[in-house]
Amino acid sequence: MKEPGRIRSFVMRAGRMTDGQQRGWDAGWCRFGLQMTTGPLDWDATFGGQGKRVVEIGFGMGDSLIAMAQAAPETQFIGIEVHKPGVGRLFAQMEALSLDNIRVYADDAVVVLRDCVADDSLDTLQVFFPDPWHKKRHHKRRLIQPDFIAMAIAKLRPGGTIHLATDWQPYADHMLDVMEAATGVMNTAGSGAFADRPSWRPETKFERRGAKRGHGVWDLLYRRSN
């Protein structure tokens, strides 16, 4: 349900699932799906032990999340994505690869982060290629805004990181302005600088397609300082 007065950074698209995505959803949701109605997330109980905690907002079709989960099997990944075909595809890939270190909320990321993720609990929050909302009148819909970032910083453990990436330079500049003005984090690349693409962020098909068209990619890495 939409909260009165809050502008969402996404629109619900009713995209039809393929048969494979539907099978992935049907088989995977009961095993890997999480509900906001259950309240604050108990990480250790959910994953059956302790590990590094990573939340990815808007994982799309799941390619990079799958690659990171494969590369770090002891890390606990929470993905948040409202596009059900993408969730279904992710579940199908998890089943095919026998991956068990990802769980998913198919809900509004702002509300999930606020209500289900405890303060001082995350090692990493990552948002890769969010909708840039190109038109000026839609800029208010962008996820990366001061209020959201202030909440995100509070969710990090001291030393935890926020990792953002975009292939749209005006949004990259906006992200940089928001992050540089935020309190409680330091830019790991130096004040006012974008980071080099970290080796642990997998290159997605979307990113490779953009590179062929001459699109740049901008990464931002900020660490909670206290």
Image (cartoon, helix red, strand yellow):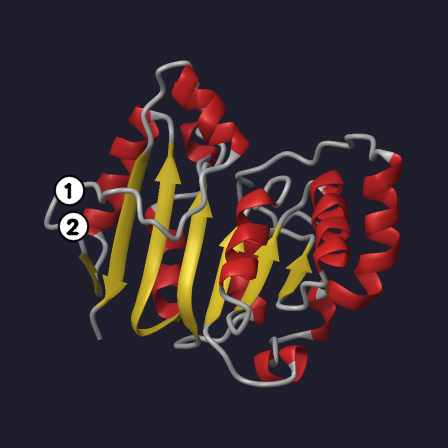
SS for callout 1: loop
The quadrant holding residue 31 is bottom right
Residue 82 visible in the picture: yes
**Residue 82 placed where, x, y %?**
67, 45
**Residue 77 placed where, x, y %?**
55, 64
**Residue 19 placed where, x, y %?**
89, 37
Amino acid beneath label 1: Ala
| Quadrant showing the C terminus | bottom left
- The residue shown at (38%, 34%) is 166
- The residue shown at (74%, 64%) is 32
SS for callout 2: loop
- Whether residue 10 is situated above or below residue 214 in the rendered picture: below
Q: Residues within 10 Å of mark 1 (few under 14, many from 20)?
A: some
| Label 2 sits on residue | 189
- Whether residue 128 is situated above or below residue 37 in the rendered picture: above
Callouts 1 and 2 close, C-beta under 8 Å: yes
- The residue shown at (44%, 76%) is 121
- The residue shown at (66%, 78%) is 46
Q: Residues within 10 Å of mark 2 (few under 14, many from 20)?
A: some
Amino acid beneath label 2: Ala
Residue at the extreme left: 191
| Label 1 sits on residue | 193
User: Relative to the observer, which residue lies in front, 122 or 1?
Assistant: 122
Residue 138 visible in the picture: no
User: Relative to the observer, which residue lies in front, 31 or 37?
Assistant: 31
Q: Which mark is residue 55?
A: none
**Residue 152 placed where, x, y %?**
40, 60
The quadrant holding residue 154 is bottom left
Whole-angstrom CA distance, mark 1 to mark 2, is 6 Å
Q: Is residue 35 left or right of residue 147?
A: right
Q: Is residue 140 left or right of residue 62?
A: left
- Whether residue 79 is situated above or below residue 88 in the rendered picture: below
